[in-house]
Amino acid sequence: MIGEPAPNTITRPYRGLSVQDVDIPLTPAAVEALIRGRETYRRTAYLALRNGGDAALVAVWPERTDTLFSPVAEVRMLSGPQTTLWITDPGTDVGNATALAQAALKHHRDVVLAYLVQGKFEHVNFIWRPSPVPIRVTEVIPPFPPKLLAMAEQVVAFDEDLPPVQLNLDAVSVADLVARHPAPHYLLPCRGCGVAAAGEISFLDGHPAYRPDWLLIGCERSLQFHEHFYRSRPGQVDLCPRARSAGPPGELLLTKCCLLERGIEVDGRTAVVPWGANLDEVRAALRTLCHLPPPGRVPHAGAPGAPDGTGHG
């Protein structure tokens, strides 16, 4: 039996949604009479029916999946004209759940269950009760926008397996740390985090002449460098994103740490990437937080859980 979709359901891939103009009332009885027993492509899982300005979302299930076309064995009207909204947004990638959710939420209405979005290349997909997954991204600024956030946004824009994601920046501000810890001289890890300050500033990566009065705004790796260069441990304010205090219970967190040199580390609902992470590592971290297999491990067609676009389990 066809059940109601879970929140954030989209058609994967969107060829599983067929858009059809009809001249019948978009009522459950009229739709069932039109669709049941009619042939449909074996990968079609949903129908977007339109009659004038009205739209409806219908789920279908074929009698057979081993033939190119099959009669429809089961029909369920998921959402009628009162709870279905058609959106035309030519800039939206309708294969991407986050892009779909963003387009839908721009037109949010409390009564709407199904948002049908016509986007790039005039392709159409739907999203059911969009509710993006919040992920906190803890990163040091400057620079702004911070690199880890920009990389995560890039991954979300191209990885079509991810659910809708809302990335929320939690900035570790070097300027704020400097302002809260007055000192005559500051030692910062590198010029990339340079800020204006009341005191003098030196940069550890330039191996400056030793100053006994400087305050290091840096992490454990910076302390290790200082010990190697100067055989001493200075006063320090930790700016490591990984050391940031925890957020609300259950929150998903993406962050970075320079003590991790390659790969990712996962601790519960926190994923850590290296300071010089590449896109593959950021992608693997986001997929792990969203309970998806690593990139490249996609179930073969027909396997349980394979992304064949049916939307039924």
Image (cartoon, rainbow, N blue to C red):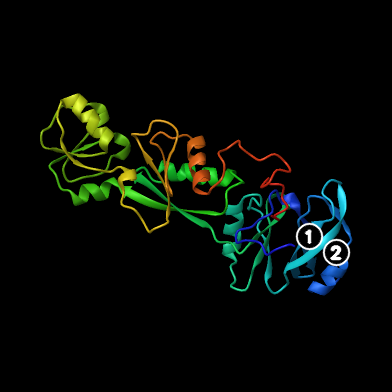
| Residue at image mark 2 | 35
The quarter of the picture where residue 223 lies is top left
Q: Is residue 135 left or right of residue 105?
A: left
Per the image, label 1 sits on a secondary structure element best described as: strand
Q: Quadrant of the C terminus?
A: bottom right
Sequence-first disc among 2 and 1: 2
Q: Nearer the viewer, residue 216 or 78?
A: 78
| Residue at image mark 1 | 60
In x, y percent, where is residue 17?
75, 55
Q: Is residue 189 visible?
A: no
Q: Is residue 149 left or right of residue 209?
A: right
- What residue is drawn where x is 21% and y is 50%? 179
Discs 2, 1 touching: Cβ within 8 Å = yes
The quarter of the picture where residue 256 lies is top left
In x, y percent, where is residue 72?
85, 59
Q: Nearer the viewer, residue 162 or 279?
A: 162
Q: Quadrant of the N terminus?
A: bottom right
In x, y percent, where is residue 121?
72, 49
The quarter of the picture where residue 84 lies is bottom right
